[in-house]
Structures are given as structure tokens and as C-alpha cells.
Image (spheres, grey):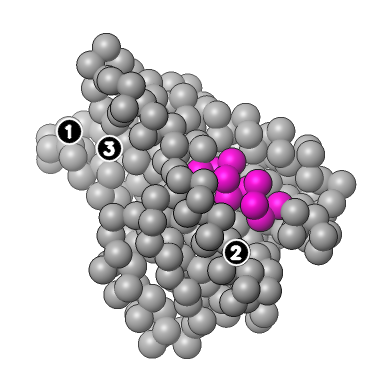
Amino acid sequence: MNKTVLITGASRGIGAAIARAFAAEGYRLALCCHNSGEQLRLLAQELKEHYHANVEIYIGDIGEYSFVEEMISDVLAVYGKIDVLINNAGISYIGLLTDMDIADWNRIVATNLTSVFSTCRLTVPHMVSAKSGRIINISSVWGNVGASCEVAYSACKGGINAFTKALGKELAPSNIQVNAIACGVIDTDMNRCFSEDERLALTEEIPAGRMGQPEEVAQLALSLATGTAYLNGQILTLDGGWI
């Protein structure tokens, strides 16, 4: 295996599970996060010890174009190419739209949506030159249907879905596949803000009878990275039949 994967938001939860899945398959990894640098360092050490993986880590604000530019330039200098780009970085905001100020809005949009533009804008030219590449965007069911009290988050994930469909069409002639995973309730830190009673009530709404696991998202991401090239511009909903 001589392929490289770049994963944003990789320090924990879904991102860390994806990193483990790709390391197990022999990928060289470039991992980034913003506020969990120590967790990312520990994950990198784990991947090196358990999978003998090549791992580069980057700590910075994925919502800042200049950081993304520096990171991708370094990844290309170290590994020579990026075969798979996984846009997983994301933050949430729960509350009424009228209680949200412009700084919160700009922060959510920069981290969740602008980051996807930035990584793709800087990675795609190299994939086009290679006539090969996979881009996988981690989205949400709220991007499909919207969620009360999560308007900004829903708007960003809806934007990612439309971005995925459009870019998939744009890059298909260059043998580059762009797909997204619209996650339902996944058992990560992002959803641990709910009380036990709230978690139980939420689980009861899901036909599968449980929350999804980060490892399940990781396995789907790996299948998108290694599966048929004819699957392109699609939003795959992973929610246990919830929405």
C-alpha cells in the first residue's frame, strides 16, 4: 500500500475511527485537528505502534484557508500525493437562531463548510493531474432534512451535500469520486451533551434501536475509498433507518 489519506477532525470520535480503519489497510496518514492536539499525538503514536503506519499530524484552525494551504503543501512535500481526502471536521451549535450572534455563525460556517471548500480547492488540482482520487465528506441527516435549534449546523451540512453532488459531476471526467456520508446519531462526544433520559428517548426513535458507532462510519468511508468508481456525487445516509 502506497496510498495517502488526509483526514480532518481526526483526534477523536468518527475521525479517529476512520484513521484506525485506514491505518489497518496500510494507508499513509495525514491527520489534523484544532483543539485536541494531545489526543491527536496519542492517536498518532497508537497508529504507529499498532499498525506501523506513517503518520503526520497538523494542529490548527481548519476554517482558516492559510492553515489548510500550509498543511496540504506539507503533506504533498512529505508523501508526494493525496489519494483520499476525508472532510470530517465539524462543530455544533444548539440553540435558537435568534440567540446566535454573527461570530458564532461565522465560526460554524468556517469550520463545517468553508473548510471543505479549502481542502478540496487545494487538493483537487493534484488529483486531476493524477486522474485519480476519492473525496469523502462527512455530513449529517440534518443536512437532508434540517433540525430545529441547529439551523447553522443544518445549513452547513446541507451545503456539504449540495457541494458533494456538484463537485462529483465536475470531477467525474477526471476519474475522481466525491461522495458524502450523512450520519444519524453516532455515539461520540458531540452527542454526549444529552442527558441519559434524552439519549434513551432518542434511541427509542431509531428503528435500529441504538446509536451508530464511529467504527461503522469508518467502515463505510473505507468502502467509498476502495469501492466502485461508478459511485459518484451521492449522499449515503447512515442512520439506522431513523430519518
Local secondary structure at mark 2 = helix
Q: Residue at x 58, y 33 (%)?
A: 161
78 up-or-down from 120: above or below: below
Q: Position of residue 192 (x, y in %)?
A: 20, 44
Q: Name the residue under label 3.
A: 203
Q: Distance between the residues labelled 2 and 3?
A: 43 Å
Q: Which residue is drawn at 63% across and 61% down?
A: 84
Q: Name the residue under label 1.
A: 198
Q: Mark 2 points at which residue?
A: 73
User: Quick check: 31 left or right of 34?
Assistant: right
27 up-or-down from 34: above or below: below
Residue 221 sits in which quadrant?
bottom right
Q: Which quadrant, please, contains the C terminus?
A: top left
Magenta span: predominant SS is helix
Q: Dot 3, crowdedness within 10 Å: few (<14), some or many (≥20)?
A: some
Q: How far apart are marks 1 and 2 (CA)?
A: 44 Å
175 up-or-down from 168: above or below: below
Answer with mark 2 or mark 3, whichever residue precedes in sequence.
2
Residue 165 sits in which quadrant?
top right
Q: Where is residue 8 in the image (x, y as percent from the top left)?
A: 47, 56
Q: Distance between the residues labelled 1 and 3?
A: 9 Å
Q: Position of residue 213 (x, y in %)?
A: 36, 54
Q: Which quadrant, please, contains the N terminus?
A: bottom right
Q: Which residue is drawn at 37% across and 21% down?
A: 151
Q: Give the range drawn in magenta.
A: 115-124
Membership of 216 in magenta stretch: no
Local secondary structure at mark 1 = helix
Q: Where is residue 141 in the image (x, y as percent from the top left)?
A: 46, 32
User: Quick check: 167 left or right of 159?
Assistant: right
Q: Dot 2, crowdedness within 10 Å: few (<14), some or many (≥20)?
A: some
